[in-house]
Amino acid sequence: MARPHHHVYVVQLDDRVWNSARFRRANPGWRLGMPFVYVGMTGLDPDLRFDKHKAGIQANRFVQLYGLRLLPQLYERYNPMAYKEAQIMEVELGIHLRACGYGVWQG
């Protein structure tokens, strides 16, 4: 059986992402002062995946334009995991952060 090597990760997004109507529509419960983030999953190391986003390689547009840094304190404890677990955790983590008032975009 293969060793678990998938990761969930969270990228802090610049406040300018709020200028996107699409992002605002996805976050009606955002609380003033809370961060904007992107939640994703990958089979790569999160640092490498972030670099690829910024370079425009299989990039999410919001991360490419507004990605500032990874927020490992929000995801490190979950990694690594199997692919299926990472798929589920990506959704669960996004739901949790949104419930806490974060502005969230999911991969």
Image (cartoon, helix red, strand yellow):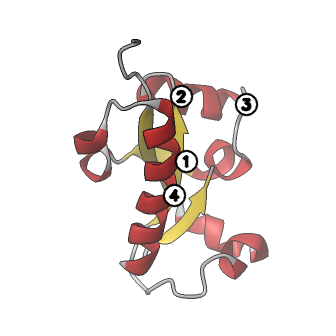
Label 3 or label 4, whichever lies nearer to me, is 4
Q: In 3D space, how far apart are the residues under numbered discs 3 and 1 (Cα atoms)?
A: 14 Å
Q: Could you say whether the residue bearing mark 3 is in a helix, strand or loop? A: loop
Q: Give the label on residue 49, or none.
A: 2
Residue 90 locus on image (x, y percent): 49, 51
Residue type at mark 3?
Gln
Q: In 3D space, how far apart are the residues under numbered discs 1 and 4 (Cα atoms)?
A: 19 Å
Judge the density around disc 4: few (<14), some (14-19), many (≥20) Cα neighbours within 10 Å.
some
Q: In 3D space, how far apart are the residues under numbered discs 3 and 4 (Cα atoms)?
A: 19 Å
The answer to whether residue 56 is left or right of residue 105 is right
Residue type at mark 1?
Gly
Which residue is at 44% across, 86% downward? Answer: 31
Q: Earlier in the sequence, mark 3 or mark 1?
A: 3
Label 4 or label 2, whichever lies nearer to me, is 4
Residue 86 locus on image (x, y percent): 46, 40
Label 1 or label 4, whichever lies nearer to me, is 4
Q: Is residue 60 above or below residue 37?
A: above
Q: In 3D space, how far apart are the residues under numbered discs 3 and 2 (Cα atoms)?
A: 9 Å
Judge the density around disc 1: few (<14), some (14-19), many (≥20) Cα neighbours within 10 Å.
many
Q: Earlier in the sequence, mark 3 or mark 4?
A: 3
Residue 65 locus on image (x, y percent): 67, 48
Residue type at mark 2?
Arg
Judge the density around disc 2: few (<14), some (14-19), many (≥20) Cα neighbours within 10 Å.
some
Q: Earlier in the sequence, mark 1 or mark 4?
A: 1
Residue type at mark 4?
Val
The residue that label 1 is drawn on is 67
The residue that label 3 is drawn on is 58
Q: In 3D space, how far apart are the residues under numbered discs 2 and 1 (Cα atoms)?
A: 12 Å
Label 3 or label 1, whichever lies nearer to me, is 3
Q: Give the label on residue 25, or none.
A: none
Which residue is at 49% across, 22% downward? Answer: 44
